C-alpha cells in the first residue's frame, strides 16, 4: 500500500567548517558520503529519498540507486540543521508516505538494519523512533507524518528533530540497534579512516 511507504531524508547541507569543506562530497572507500547515506536508506527500504543540499550542489542525476532521489536546495543552510529538516519535510509533504527516516551525511558507518528496525517500529504504531547504541540515542531517527508539522516548527539552529523529540519523550520509541553499525561522526578528515 503506497500510503504505508517510509521516505528517507539525508541532511547534507553543511559546509563542514571543522572538516575543511562540505562533508557530503568527501569520499570513503571511493564513494561520496552523501552516496553512502542515500544507499543506507535505500537498502533499509525507504522510498523516495530526499537529499537536502546547501553549501555544495548535489545534482540528482549523480545518484545511481534503485529508488527516486529528489534533491532540494536549502538557501538557509548556514542557519543550521533545523532549516534543512524543514526543507526536507516540506518537499516530502507532497509524497504519499506515512513516515520518514532521517539520517545525517556524516555517519557513514550506520547500517541498513537500523533503518529497517525504525520502519518496523513505525509499522507497530510508533509516532517517533530513535536508534540507540549501548543505550544512548543516536541516528537514524523516524518521524511519523502526523508529527512533521510540529517537528518542523520546533527545528531551529542545529537541533534538527532533537527539539521535538525532547518535548515529547512519551511519543519516542527507543530502538536498540547495537550490532547493526556504528554511530560515529565524521568531524575531521582523519575520521574517515574508521571513526573514533
Image: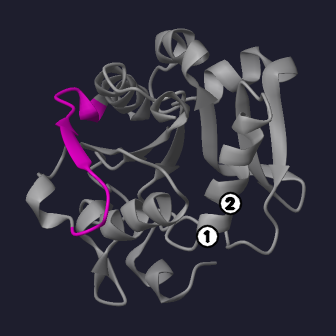
Tag 1's secondary structure? loop
Residue 146 percent coordinates (x, y): 59, 14
Residue 89 place in picture, x, y as percent: 39, 25
Residue position marked by numbered label 1 in the rendering: 111
Quadrant of the rendered image containing residue 42:
bottom left
- Can you tell which mark lies on residue 66? none
Q: Are marks 2 and 1 in contact (CB under 8 Å)?
A: yes
* Badge number at residue 114: 2
| Quadrant (top left/top right/bottom left/bottom right) for the C terminus | bottom right
Closest to the observer, 59 or 77: 59
The reply, left or right, for residue 7 in relation to residue 101 is left
Q: Can residue 120 be seen in this view?
A: yes
Magenta stretch: includes residue 74: yes
Can residue 183 be seen?
no
Span shown in magenta:
64-78
Give percent across and percent down for residue 139. Answer: 63, 51
Amino acid at each position: 500500500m503506497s500510503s504505508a511507504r517510509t521516505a528517507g531524508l539525508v541532511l547534507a547541507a553543511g559546509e563542514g567548517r571543522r572538516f575543511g569543506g562540505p562533508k557530503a562530497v568527501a569520499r570513503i572507500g571511493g564513494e561520496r558520503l552523501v552516496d553512502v547515506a542515500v544507499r543506507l536508506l535505500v537498502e533499509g527500504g525507504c522510498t523516495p529519498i530526499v537529499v537536502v543540499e546547501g553549501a555544495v550542489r548535489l545534482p540528482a542525476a549523480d545518484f545511481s540507486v534503485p529508488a527516486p532521489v529528489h534533491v532540494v536546495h536549502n538557501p538557509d543552510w548556514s542557519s543550521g540543521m533545523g532549516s534543512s529538516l524543514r526543507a526536507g519535510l516540506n518537499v516530502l509533504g507532497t509524497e504519499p508516505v506515512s513516515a520518514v527516516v532521517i539520517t545525517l551525511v556524516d555517519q557513514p558507518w550506520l547500517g541498513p538494519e537500523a533503518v529497517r528496525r525504525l520502519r518496523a517500529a513505525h509499522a507497530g504504531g510508533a509516532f517517533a523512533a530513535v536508534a540507540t547504541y549501548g543505550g544512548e540515542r543516536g541516528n537514524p531517527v523516524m518521524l511519523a507524518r502526523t508529527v512533521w508539522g510540529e517537528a518542523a516548527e520546533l527545528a531551529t539552529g542545529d537541533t534538527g528533530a532533537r527539539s521535538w523529540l525532547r518535548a515529547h519523550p512519551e511519543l519516542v520509541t527507543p530502538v536498540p540497534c547495537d550490532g547493526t553499525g556504528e554511530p560515529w561522526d565524521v568531524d575531521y578528515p582523519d575520521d574517515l579512516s574508521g571513526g573514533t
